[in-house]
Amino acid sequence: MRSRVGRRLPASVRDVPGAGGVRESNAAAVLAAARREGPLSRAEIARLTGLSMPTVSRQITALTDLALLREAPEVATGGGIGRPTVPVRLDENVIAACGVHIGIVTTTYGLTTLSGRLLGSERIPTPQGSAADVLRAIGDEVSTFLAEWPQRRIIGIGLAIGGQVDAERGRLDHGPLDWHGVPARDVLEEVTGLAVHLDGHVPAMATAELLFGVSGRAASSLYFYAREMTGVAVAVDGVLHRGPGQSGSIAHLPVGSDVRCDCGRTGCLEATVAERAVVERARDAGIITGSELSDLVAAADADPRARGMLTERARALGRAIAMTRDLVNPELVVLGGQAITETPAYLDTVLAEFASSTMLPGTDLITVTRFGRNVQAMAACTGLLTQLYDHPLSLLGAGAPHDRRDA
């Protein structure tokens, strides 16, 4: 059933490279200045962007009409002779972006404002069945969730998932889910009636850190993710490196454990630290009877075997972080994923193993994502927000023929 919470958006951004031309780039520059530094006066935006005052004024009018910017009289300056200067800022009250992260075990979806403030999120067990059935079931769940926000203009859905992602064609392959050549974008758009932007989950999380975390302030950064799957993403000067397909898989990075991997080798990172794999080994050893990582964490309070398993997992993570850091040599390393955030008592072990394993000087460059358990929802939303920031006129259907006055 099609959602009625938002209209289907034009596909101009994904179908027409460079959509919007000079007018689009000017609008994006004005929006970026207001988003990063706002509230700002028109003169301040002109100074930051290098655009003329008339061009800035025209773009502010267009962006205000689209509910992307609003005037902020509450922080107006002046009050003496002459008209007060009324700055502009992001309009947080109208537009929202939905994000869906499909994991092997859990699917998370949420809704954010233009500035990345999470309005709400839900987690459900990833449905079972064929890829099409799973996507339709998730689409129905998301439509019901979005119906709770009738006052918001929802501009689309960002879909983040592991595996091999072809964002241009909207198709994906996901080995653990046994999905091959799945037209994920088309299926989810059909169910929800909203435009869908597809991205790999680790690049999406790294993008969220660049836009709303601390990575955007670093000259170079490495994002390290671990939960059921593992991966890394690298950014330089605020730009995420993207190789062909889904880059950054470190599933088979050798971390020196004695765990047998499905690939036939021993000691692969993902087989060693993945949540389901760790829980399964604990069950097989009779340490726990439950099926959640929280069961193992609880058992560690009294059972040294449980503590030993979690400690060895933390050490494996620390060694993997050291290896990837030494390879990339970034200014900043950001850790994300429930393998880090759901076991905070073992973070010191992760960091100690990193410090003893890295071959480069300096061990104080690591930080943990501020998004916590919301990292998946934030990441999925961010992919769509990035498209909006870069192509505000085209994405919202306001593209117009090039006006020479905007050049």
Image (cartoon, rainbow, N blue to C red):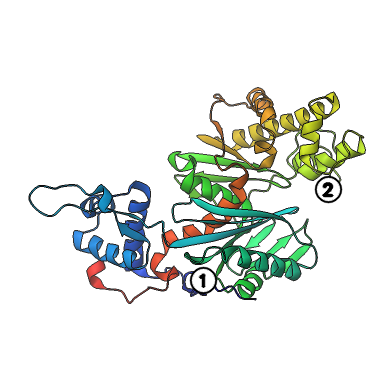
Q: Is residue 327 above or below residue 379?
A: above
For the point 65% across and 37% down, the residue is: 341
Is residue 174 visible in this depiction of the protein?
A: yes
| Mark 2, residue position | 263
Is residue 309 visible in this depiction of the protein?
A: no
On-image quarter of the C terminus: bottom left
Mark 2 residue element: loop
**x, y percent for residue 297:** 77, 33
For the point 76% across and 61% down, the residue is: 127
**x, y percent for residue 174:** 73, 59
Q: CA distance from mark 1 to mark 2?
A: 44 Å
Residue 128 falls in image quadrant: bottom right
| Mark 1, residue position | 6
Q: Is residue 308 above or below residue 394?
A: above
Q: Nearer the viewer, residue 60 or 1?
A: 1
Mark 2 neighbour class, 10 Å CA radius: few under 14, some 14 to 19, many 20 or more: few
**Amino acid at pointer 2:** Cys
**x, y percent for residue 142:** 63, 64
Mark 1 neighbour class, 10 Å CA radius: few under 14, some 14 to 19, many 20 or more: some
Q: Nearer the viewer, residue 402 or 326?
A: 402
**x, y percent for residue 150:** 51, 67
Q: Residue furthest left?
A: 81
For the point 68% across and 28% down, the residue is: 345
Residue 291 falls in image quadrant: top right
Mark 1 residue element: loop
25 to the left or right of 127 = left
**Amino acid at pointer 1:** Gly
Looking at marks 1 and 2 on the same chain, the residue that comes earlier in the sequence is marked by: 1
| Residue 354 circle label | none
Q: Nearer the viewer, residue 226 or 297?
A: 297
